[in-house]
Image (cartoon, rainbow, N blue to C red):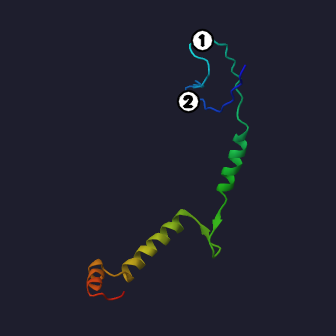
Amino acid sequence: MPTIKLRSQIGRDGILHLDIPSDFKETEVNVTVTVEAVQEVSEDLASRKEERKPRYNAWGNPVVEQSVTQAISGMRRLQKTVALPKSEIRAMREERRRF
């Protein structure tokens, strides 16, 4: 008698759907199902708590969404300040100048 172990998830409706491959075809079989809660849930919660710990950048400042957004906007401002316009780059290429 083969034993098949698998992990599945019970949906919001409380119904467990199983698609189990089998060597048996067009025959009647006895099926026994044992349902156990997964113990790794507590480990997942612990890892999520670790993910929520504050992270710090190289200068010791906390990394938060706002600081990342500010850094991106600062880089875009700098790009506008120092970047060459595309038309100038094309002209320099045509003249075979280095930029």
| Residue at x 29% of width, y 83% of height | 93
The front one of 31 and 61 is 31
Give the label, 1 or 2, closer to the camera: 1
Q: Quadrant of residue 37?
A: top right
Q: Looking at the picture, does residue 22 appear above or below residue 76?
A: above
**Which residue is identified by label 1?**
27
Q: CA distance from mark 1 to mark 2?
A: 32 Å
The front one of 50 and 97 is 97
The type of residue carrying mark 2 is Arg
| Residue at x 33% of width, y 82% of height | 84
Q: Return the residue found at the far top.
A: 28
| Residue 75 in picture, x, y percent from top left | 45, 75
The front one of 88 and 51 is 88
Q: Looking at the picture, does residue 27 appear above or below residue 93?
A: above
The type of residue carrying mark 1 is Thr
What is the secondary structure assignment of the residue under circle 1? loop
What is the secondary structure assignment of the residue under circle 2? loop
Q: Quadrant of residue 24?
A: top right
| Residue 99 in picture, x, y percent from top left | 36, 86
| Residue at x 70% of width, y 35% of height | 38
Q: Quadrant of residue 58?
A: bottom right
The front one of 28 and 44 is 28
**Circle 2 residues within 10 Å: few <14, some 14–19, many ≥20:** few
Mark 1 and mark 2 lie on one chain; the one further toward the N terminus is 2
**Which residue is identified by label 2?**
12
| Residue at x 26% of width, y 87% of height | 95
Q: Looking at the picture, does residue 3 appear above or below residue 48?
A: above
Q: Going by the image, does 9 lie left or right of 41?
A: left
Q: Are marks 1 and 2 in contact (CB under 8 Å)?
A: no
